[in-house]
Image (spheres, rainbow, N blue to C red):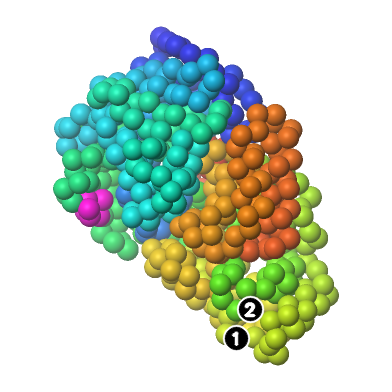
Amino acid sequence: MKRRCSILIAVSFVLGSMLSGCFAGGSGTPAGTGAAQEPGKTGTAGTNSSGEPQVLRMNLEEPATLDPTFAEDTVSGAIIRAVFDGLTRLDKDGQPIYSIASDMKVSEDKTVYTFTLRDAKWSNGDPVTAHDFEFAWKHALDPKTGSQAAYQFYSIKNAQAFAAGRAKRDDVGVRALDDKTLQVTLEHPTPYFPTLAAFLMPINKKVAEANEHWAKDPKTLVGNGPFKLEKWEHKNKLVLVKSDTYWDHEAVKLDRIEFSMISDANTELALFQNGDLDWAGGPISSLPVDAVKPLKEEGKLKTKPKATSYYIRFNTERVPFTNANVRKAFAYAINRKEIADNIGQAGQTPLMGITPITASLKPEGFFADNQPEEARRLLAEGMKELGITKLPEISYLYNTSDRNKAIAEALQATWKQVLGVDVKLVNKETKVYLDDQEQGKFEITRSSWTADYNDPVNFLEKFIEKYSSSNITRWHNPTYTELIHKSYAETDEAKRRQLLLEAETLLMDEMPLTGIFSDVSAWVQNDKVKGVQIDPLSKIDFKWAYKE
């Protein structure tokens, strides 16, 4: 297949090393992915080898949103990647390739990126323009919008200042020079920006300005990706169909993707085993806890390490978690190895920090796992500092899944056994759970974060602003913020990592959050399903998927 590489730049790819990256040409096919580059080779577009329609059947949780402006969870991101297309897209190795962009030029000082857009259309037939990208990115940053995903744009000049209300919209370094040219100016050289650009989606400016609820209904949702939304029956079903307006539609082999919304993992697995689903488990759902080990022993389980931290966050504005020693007491009481081995069961690694093993600054952790005696001492000390002899009611908020429930129950039992504290478990469906987090309606809450790019700063920068929508702990330390900002400007990699190490050390000393484990994706799939890409960040992409 003919390829044209117009540039060769140093890109910080997802393995965390500096590699030379080359984008594929106009075909949109991933570079260097071997046979997986040619999905559908056993049949024609829209059919499998037996001539049947190409339909993929999967299960997922209810997406919190399909508006790229607000998407921060894994499930929403998976559907958005199917319905939208960024300047770049990631191949199965996590390497950026051209998508809506057909060319990219980088200034000598590596701070100005100029993207040329190809001829592409929205699902309603409108042309995709550079103005759509400028509108979408600035809309996400606008403090009036309140997007939890705004921090993803902070490498762009004045983006963080605008999000914090310290700069104007026009100060942000994103500008459509014309319909086909987008210029992005960065605060500092950011070698992973081409990778990050794969997640910074456009929005149809005309559609969004006419209807603020455009992303909530299949009739009004307009995307520019390989699929379009046909049906969204909340808590029941979501259906995507191939988009005939997609610029690279010939590479798309699936006619439909039918997503069930079954909250019970045992039911999901049973449907897979009965042939009613083609896939069960990660990365957009989960397997039953007690099924992981037997599936592994039977050789049916597929696993892949991912750049994901499973952790818990404390609300530092609610007593008793206003006190660092109390927070550390609850953190030190946890037996992470027991949770990883007995609930995870798929190779999860205990996490005594926030950065996962794929991007770890200190793999051994910042403190020892399972310290019951120290936990009791810290709790007593913290309560004394607060001037209280009895703890108020404490709740643990989590979203529905078999694994989340099992982990919540394990934490509840541990805190009772080690600290003598009764913790109430509060289980809510994902959208309500996320709303409650943002509104501070919790004492402790389950969290997880999968990197947009495999660098420790992607985990640490979420906590630099006290009242940013991504920092629901409401913790703030000026020294921490300064360390992160210094790391942005540091071009020496060893010195940059040292700054980040100091920042994570400070974070773990004050403990507004604590890790549980570094996660993996675990799933089972129909052997006839091919081309579903799960990159090293565990982000799933259906563009090249097909069934034999």
* 411 versus 204 height, above or below: below
Residue 259 rendering spot, x and y as whole percentages: 34, 51
Residue 511 rendering spot, x and y as whole percentages: 68, 63
Front-most of 353 and 159? 159
Residue at numbered disc 2: 320
Would you call the spot at circle 2 few (<14 residues within 10 Å), some (14-19), or many (20 or more)? many
Residue shown at 36%/43% (left/top)?
A: 168
Q: Are marks 2 and 1 in contact (CB under 8 Å)?
A: yes
Q: Which mark is residue 392?
A: 1
- Name the quarter where the C terminus is drawn: top left
Q: Which mark is residue 161?
A: none
263 on left or right of 21? left
164 on left or right of 322? left
Q: Amino acid at mark 2?
A: Pro
> What SS does tag 2 mark?
loop
Quarter assignment of residue 407 = bottom right
- Name the quarter where the N terminus is drawn: top left
Front-most of 145 and 341? 145
Residue 44 rendering spot, x and y as whole percentages: 30, 24
Residue shown at 80%/69% (left/top)?
A: 371
Residue 217 falls within the magenta-colored stretch? yes
Front-most of 361 and 93? 361
Residue range of the region highlighted in magenta in the rendering? 212-218
Residue 499 rendering spot, x and y as whole percentages: 71, 42
* 430 versus 1 height, above or below: below
Whether residue 342 is visible, yes or no, is no
